Image (cartoon, helix red, strand yellow):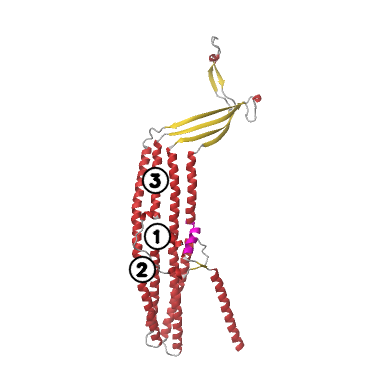
Amino acid sequence: MKTPSRFIKLKTVAFIFVASLLSAGVSAQSQTLTLKDAIKYALENKADAKKAKLEIENSEYQIQEVRSRALPQITANGNVTYNPILQLNAIDMGAFAPPGTPTTGGVQLVPFGQKWNSTAGVSLTQAIFDQAVFTGLKAAKSTREFYQINAQLTEEQVIERVANAYYEVFVQKEKLSVIDSNYVNTTKAKGIIQGQFDNGLAKKIDLDRITVKLYNINTQRQQLINAVQLQENALKFYMGMPIETPITLPKTEFEVTPQALAEAPNTANRTEYLLLDKQEQLLTYQKKSIIAEYYPTLSLSAGYNYIGQGPELPWFKKPSDDVYWSDYSSIGLNLRIPIFTGFGTRARVRQAEVDLRKIQADKEDTKLSLDLAFENARTQIENSLITIKNQKENAQLAQEVLDNTRNNYYQGLAPLTDLLDAENSLVEAQNNYTSALLEYKLAEIQLIKSKGELRTLTN
């Protein structure tokens, strides 16, 4: 009998050992993720951040496109034409008679041209003065700056989403930890009550009640496990991380750190406001480019061509084949002076002025919104600090009450109801404390954002 018992114990030890190795292997594969690591990963991998960088790259090509309008435009051209029927022209043949010669011949129909014509040449156009081109070059450079600021704003939005999701995961995990602790303690209590019941020292209703509570705790635990998984998936999505990647969050990331609350930020330095400033500048250039339509334009054009004519396809033919080649060229200045456009240009200028007034209204509203966000974040920080202090003391008190109630119940001095109520109060107090920490952390992010310092989270 001793041998099988020892064999069973050895199997149990071996199973625990193997399970611990497997657990260690899974933990080794899990990626420990600090908030800074999560943000850096998101800035390198999230599609929004990648697209913002591509917009900056694209702005360089837009500048090149506008700059090309100020550079010479050179084109090559060529064609071949076959005329099955040549046009006949009525010619007074007497006009070709030598002076003093009697006019003879009258009017005759004479074909002009050849059955085949082929030309090849090159042409050049160079803008000498075009106010719209000069304005477009300035606007293109501002467009590059606009996309740079927009990329910075996009990065800040990515940082904010990742930080919020990160703390949401942590809170759900803390609540799961509280439930796990409650489950362990309640299981111990059930074991004691089961022993008392077996010895006739406890009622069956007490055993049934503690069993029901265990079932309820287990249900809550499964719900929290699901919530943690969903929240982790959301975090990975905001980071641009593969969903199947296991992650671990260190508890040090949830510490309460003091924040400077007295100094209000300069709204004009916020990325949102700078972006509107740049939009206003672009709209100003847009207005100037429309006004430029009132200005005359001057350009240079030049061309050189080679033409072949004959009764058959001129390619590779010579005069001996009745095919003749010759060249010609031209150089000219082209001046265009707008005189009357039906008031269309004036209407477009006024539309541009309306757009400018709209962006100015947006700037005023944005400034007010940013000031509001800072004040709200500061107020939330102050309130959260008070709530954290109160809930921490409340959780400590609830723990003491539970310890005393549990001791009294085991000694028969308190009913089971008091024990269950004390456990529920402790869980509620611990969850309230965790929720207060979350509110503080979310307010902290908003405060950092209102100061324009979200990038400091990557340091």
Return the x and y of residue 232 as percentages of the image width and height: 47, 66
Provide the residue designation for mark 2.
Answer: 384
Query: 172 and 73: which one is in front?
Result: 73
Apparent side of residue 216 relative to residue 23 in the rendered image (left or right):
left
Apparent side of residue 288 relative to residue 80 in the rendered image (left or right):
left
Return the x and y of residue 410 as percentages of the image width and height: 41, 86
Q: How dense is the environment of label 2, judged by Cα within 10 Å: few (below 14), some, or many (20 and up)?
A: many
- First in sequence: mark 3 or mark 2? 3
Provide the residue designation for mark 1.
Answer: 449
Q: Is residue 1 visible?
A: no
What residue type is disc 2 on?
A: Ser
Asked if 449 appears above or below 284 in the picture, the reply is below
What residue type is disc 1 on?
A: Lys
Is residue 196 highlighted in magenta?
A: no
At numbered mark 2, what does the secondary structure look like: helix, strand or loop? helix
Q: Which residues are magenta?
A: 36-48
Using the image, tell me which numbered label, if any, was put on residue 283.
3
Q: How dense is the environment of label 1, judged by Cα within 10 Å: few (below 14), some, or many (20 and up)?
A: many
- First in sequence: mark 1 or mark 2? 2
